[in-house]
Amino acid sequence: MFSVKRLVESGNCNQSVPSEYVFETNPNDDCTNITDADTIPTIDFSLLTSGSPEQRSNVIQSIGKACREWGFFMVINHGVAKTVRDEMLRASKSFFEQTEEQMQEYAGKKLFDPIRYGTSINRAMDNTIFWRDYLKIDVHPHFNAPQNPPGLRIGEEFQMKLHQSL
């Protein structure tokens, strides 16, 4: 299966989307009546490291609930500087503006490759239909990323800021 990007760039989306990814619009899905109960869960990360034992316990319970009920959550007070977040978004956008062939250089061959590009997910394992292109970069304070891997230009200043924020 080719990437979502290649499908969009082909201009033939209506004819080429695999049928399992096509969903009819449900007229009963009304997004105009959103209530406070529909707000994306927000987790205050600082309470995990500097809060009281009771606060840490509540945050952990909130994370579990958010994962069970929503599948995701928003994190605040994480300590990652806005400049680092902006640079990560810029670098990610730059990566996906490359040609398919350039991105394939980072096609995930092994699960633990520190930089992996791919499309879709393993439906056999996840039993989920969610087709997307992704770039996964595992960053750890002790991980020595290539300085400037071809096709993935992340400046030294950005790498330093990222490692400092971890």
Image: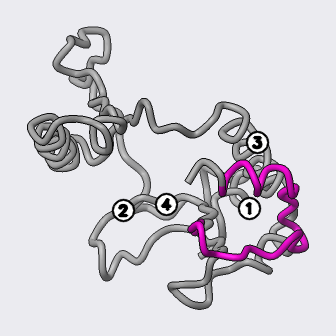
Q: Is residue 8 above or below residue 133?
A: above
> Magenta region: which residues?
138-163
The residue lying toward the viewer, choosing from 67 and 30, is 67
Which residue carries the number 4 mark?
131
Residue 38: image quadrant is: top left
Nearer mark to the viewer, of 3 and 2: 3
| Closer mark to the observer between disc 3 and disc 4 | 3
The residue carrying mark 2 is: 129
Q: Earlier in the sequence, mark 3 or mark 2?
A: 3
Mark 3: which amino acid?
A: Glu
| Amino acid type, callout 2 | Ile
Left of 35 or right of it: where is 115? right
* Three-letter amino acid code of the residue under disc 1: Arg
Q: Position of residue 63 (x, y in %)?
A: 21, 44
Sort mark 4 into few (<14), some (14-19) or many (20+) by Cα contacts within 10 Å: some
Q: Quadrant of residue 57?
A: top left
Name the colouring of the figure: one colour
Amino acid identity at mark 4: Trp
Residue at image coords 21%, 13%: 36
In this rendered view, identify the residue nearer to me: 3 or 158.
Answer: 158
Q: How would you rate the neighbour count of disc 3 (Cα within 10 Å): few for under 14, some for 14-19, many for 20 or more?
A: some
Q: Separation of disc 2 and disc 1 at Cα?
A: 19 Å
